[in-house]
Image (cartoon, grey):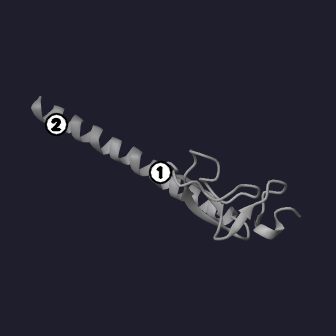
Amino acid sequence: MAWNSQMMLTLWIVTIVLIFSSSRCERILDLRKTKKSCKNGEVLGCVSGHGPPGCSENECGMGPRPKACFFDCHYGCWCTGKLYRRKRDRKCVPKHECLL
């Protein structure tokens, strides 16, 4: 009987490990799909999704980034470098094109 309970425990542990492994693989595949969907001027990355406006990426019409942002991580396509997200068409543009 003791051998049987050890075997059941082992099976449960293996099942749990497999479930977590498969969900991790699904997230990696999702990130690959997301990376392919990034447009010009965007890069796949991790940015803060909460906090004051401007923590996630540069946005047209927003001032400089706040000094205090949360350290949570939201993966997605974000404007790179000195590009800003234009609200009208959601494109990444240089600051001087924000009003166009």
Residue closest to the far left: 2
Vertical position of residue 15 compared to residue 41: above or below: above
**Among the 4 quarters of the image, the one containing residue 89:** bottom right
Residue at x-position 57% and y-position 45%: 50
Vertical position of residue 23 compared to residue 42: above or below: above
Helix or strand or loop: what does disc 2 sit on? Answer: helix
Question: Please, what is the three-letter code of the amino acid marked with disc 2?
Answer: Gln
Q: Position of residue 66 (x, y in %)?
A: 58, 54
Helix or strand or loop: what does disc 1 sit on? Answer: loop
**Among the 4 quarters of the image, the one containing residue 90:** bottom right
Q: CA distance from mark 2 to mark 1?
A: 41 Å
Horizontal side of 41 relative to 12 (left or right) equals: right
Out of 23 and 46, give the one closest to the viewer.
46
Number of numbered callouts drawn: 2
Whichever of labels 2 and 1 marks the residue nearer the N terminus, that label is 2
Q: Position of residue 43 (x, y in %)?
A: 63, 67
Question: Please, what is the three-letter code of the amino acid marked with disc 1?
Answer: Phe
Out of 97 and 2, give the one closest to the viewer.
97
Vertical position of residue 64 compared to residue 13: above or below: below
Q: Quadrant of the C terminus?
A: bottom right
Q: Position of residue 77 (x, y in %)?
A: 65, 60
Q: Which mark is residue 6?
A: 2
Vertical position of residue 80 compared to residue 22: above or below: below
Which residue is label 1 attached to? 71
Q: Which mark is residue 92?
A: none
Dot 2 crowding, Cα within 10 Å, few <14, some 14–19, many 20+: few
Q: Quadrant of the N terminus?
A: top left
- Disc 2 versus disc 1: nearer the observer: 1
Q: Position of residue 25 (x, y in %)?
A: 48, 55
Out of 51 and 91, give the one closest to the viewer.
51
Dot 1 crowding, Cα within 10 Å, few <14, some 14–19, many 20+: few
Horizontal side of 51 relative to 36 (left or right) equals: left
